[in-house]
Structure formats: C-alpha cells, structure tokens
Image: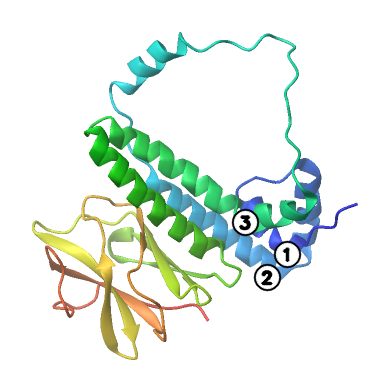
Amino acid sequence: MMTIDLHRLTGAYALHALSDEENASFERHLVGCESCAQETAELSATATRLGLAVAAPASPALREQVLRRITTVRQETPGMPVRVLPVRAGLKGRLLSRWALAACLAAAAALGVTTVWQHQQAADARAEARQASRSTDEIAAVLAAPDARTRSAGLAGGATGTVVVSHSRDRAVFAVSGMTRPSGGKVYQLWFNDGGNMRSAGLMDPDRSDQAVLMQGGVDRASGMGITVEPDGGSKQPTTTPLALMTFPG
C-alpha cells in the first residue's frame, strides 16, 4: 500500500483535489499540525486571488458559438464504460502535493486566453497565449514551491494584497484584490526593498482591480516590497510616497 506524506498535500487539499479517503486523512492530520493548517489557509486565500487575476469576461458571441459547435459533438452512448489510464504510484504524491495548484491555474489561464482570442487576430492571440502561459507557469511554480511563504496586508481603499516568496526559486508573486484604478496617465509600480533602496519589480495593470503579478527580477536579499503611483511607463526610482510597504515573510 502506497504511503503519502500528508505534509505535502496542502495545495491539493486547498483546491479540493484529493479523493474522499485522502481528504478525510488530511483533515485528521490538520487537527494536530499547526504548520499545515496555516499553509492550507494561505494557499486557499492566494488561489482565490490568483483565480480572480486570470479570469476574463466572456465574449457576447461565446454562447452562440458554443451552441453551434455542440451540435457537431457526438454524444457518448449511455452505459459505455469510461476508460481510466493508470498513473504510476510514485508520481501521485508529487503531482497532487506540488503541482495540483499549477494545473488549476494553467486551466484558468487557458479559459482567459480563449476569450482574448475571440477579439484579436489569430497570430496575435497565439503570441499572447504563449506569453500568458509562461507567466502563469512561473506564478504557479512560485506558489507551489516547497519553501513558498505568504503574507497578506490591507491596502488603501479596502484592497488586500498578498505576497508569496520562494527563495529557492528566487522569485516573488504579488496578488491584489479590490485595487482602485489610478488617476489618468498613472500606473502602480512594484518595488523590491533592498535594505532601504527601492529596486523596480515591474508594473501592474491599471485597468484591473484583481490581478496577480510575477515581480520582475530576483528576490535576492530584498527584505520586502513597496507599491507607488508612477507616470505611465514607470520610473527608475520611486517619485511618490509608497502606498504600501510589506515585509517579506521569513
């Protein structure tokens, strides 16, 4: 009988990706494991924000296209057995524990890319899809890293920000929910705090109140991050007082 390390199922449990038996075992484990309980709560909150970040409104023509295409799909005969492909036992624990969340995020990104494709030329859509897929894969890899640590904080205007840091991957992800749109011609810029020196970590999308951003550049020895309002295109150094300063989780 295969033994699964319950400490490695936090991500799969947060996404309801466990079997009934595994789910029951993990919930019994949570009662006596404070670290897993905390990590599960953080992953659940972060997964929700990242899901909002990759969501996209459906095209008005999408319903019509689905109804038209479904007429060409052959219905499965009732009673036909479902073929189940075997999965090697040695892979099961690793796939569920570290990459279940990555797979879920990739699926969400694919839905968002499908909507974008409806509004753009095919060549542009394919290029954007490749870029979005790479970004989503990198975000998921940070979130699923064994040493990923999360910290959340309230921001101005009732927004909530969450930063996820993985020192093994030397990357950080910032997710925000409820961010107000900056004034015209302005953008939100992210910064690494290197001992008081602010290093640019990229721009946020000014048109999205809920989003996840892979911070540009390595974490290195940064102790935290900041957010400022900058002119369109960003600045080499902060030109305004930070809206928020967050210390990275230890």
105 on left or right of 184: right
Q: For the image shown, how many numbered marks are present on the structure?
A: 3
Image spot of residue 29 (x, y percent): 79, 60
Task: Name the foreground residue: 142 vs 182.
Answer: 142
Residue at 33% from the left image edge and 79% from the top image edge: 192
Task: Give the residue number, with chain letter if any, for mark 3.
Answer: 11
Residue 241 in the image: above or below residue 120: below
* Tag shown at residue 7: 1
Q: Residues within 10 Å of mark 1 (few under 14, many from 20)?
A: some
Image spot of residue 20 (x, y percent): 77, 42
Look at the numbered discs 3 and 2 and tell me whether their residues touch, using CB distance below 8 Å.
no
Task: Give the residue number, with chain letter if any, for mark 2.
Answer: 35
Residue at 33% from the left image edge and 66% from the top image edge: 155
Residue 145 in the image: above or below residue 168: above
Spatial CA span between label 2 and label 1: 9 Å
Lower position in the chain sequence, tag 3 or tag 2: 3
Image spot of residue 3 (x, y percent): 85, 57
Residue 64 in the image: above or below residue 100: above
Task: Name the foreground residue: 138 vs 173.
Answer: 138
- Of circles 3 and 2, which is in front? 3
141 on left or right of 203: right
* Residue type at tag 2: Ser
Residue farthest front in this picture: 123
Look at the numbered discs 2 and 1 and tell me whether their residues touch, using CB distance below 8 Å.
yes
SS at circle 2: helix
* Residue type at tag 1: His
* Residue type at tag 3: Gly
Residue at 46% from the left image edge and 13% from the top image edge: 70
SS at circle 1: helix
Image spot of residue 83 (x, y percent): 73, 26
Residue 104 in the image: above or below residue 3: above
145 on left or right of 204: right
